[in-house]
Image (tube, grey):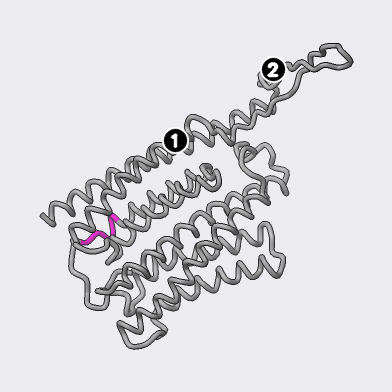
Amino acid sequence: MTTNLATYSVVLTYSAIAVYVIAFIAFALDMAKRSGEVTAAAAGASTAAAERTVATVQGGTVVLEKVAESTDRSDRGTKFERVGMAVTILALVLHVGAVVLRGIAADRVPWGNMFEFSLTGTALITLIFLLVQFWQNLKFLGVFISGLTIILLGIATVNYYVPVRPLVPALESYWLVIHVFVAIAGTGFFALGAGLAVAQLVQTSRQSRGLATKLRFMETLPDADRLEVLSYRVILVGFVLWTFTLIAGAIWAERAWGRYWGWDTKEVWTFIIWTLYAGYIHARATRGWRGARSSWLALIGFAAVMFNFAVVNVFFKGLHSYSGL
């Protein structure tokens, strides 16, 4: 029974990847559609459609006036954006199904090794992306989030898959549930912040270098200042979660190994990530770092997160190596 559930989990995982690819294509087409609409509007092709006639009363006389309407569709989005969001939800349903089946097969939380951590982590990144839409319209990050999920989930499935196996004694703790889950959630917010930082850098580059004719779809996105503020806000949430991760990890280490800190490779890199994002928040809040400098520092922090995931977890030896985390 356990083997069958694990197999079904893998099938759902591959299905989710396929559906994420469809979502990625839809979001990419949305960018192309936005670019085409902006270009057409700039050329005057939609001038007539962008005007409407209104009647006003001036001194007892009815006057007809033509008033320009905005052609910005960033709030409504294109049909490709709507398809991308719908398909992303479908992919997440399949993805969560894979996570749940893996957890049932293992009879524990499904993040006890590198494959399970990747499976659950990418699902939570996508879920955070969808939930954030209730706060702010960040659908334009769909191509970034779906692309990142495809890459990470694909690598994990091909390179890190292992059969269901029992946990080693050090991981048999409720801290596995708390510490790792919060770390995954923090990574999800860092991913959103990185996507916004990339968008901010592109907007700044277009404005400062006069590249108005390039990447026209960017005109339907918020301006560079707004993108930088949004990036700071979501990274701030991720930093709070990562701070808790660092503290919880130290408490768990004392329970498992009898010391709070031992300069293990994983511990060091967790602290490095925390330091980078603390520096980002401090520089922005007290040193007046804004714009491109702030965004580059945010991307350096996310690069450290990805290095921790892809390199430290796999190639460095330490007390965390046996867990795949």
On-image quarter of the N terminus: bottom left
Residue 159 forms part of the magenta stretch: yes
Which stretch appears magenta? 157-162
- Identify the mark at residue 140; answer none if there is no mark: none
- Which residue appears at 67% of the width and 36% of the height? 213
Q: Nearer the viewer, residue 76 or 268?
A: 76
- Identify the mark at residue 26; answer none if there is no mark: 1
Quick one: which residue is furthest to the front in this view?
Answer: 60
Percent x, y of residue 215: 61, 39
- Which residue appears at 43% of the width and 71% of the height? 245
Circle 1 SS class: helix
On-image quarter of the C terminus: bottom left
- Which residue appears at 50% of the width and 60% of the height? 190
Q: Is residue 298 left or right of residue 160?
A: right
Amino acid type, mark 1? Ala
How would you rate the neighbour count of disc 2 (Cα within 10 Å): few for under 14, some for 14-19, many for 20 or more? few
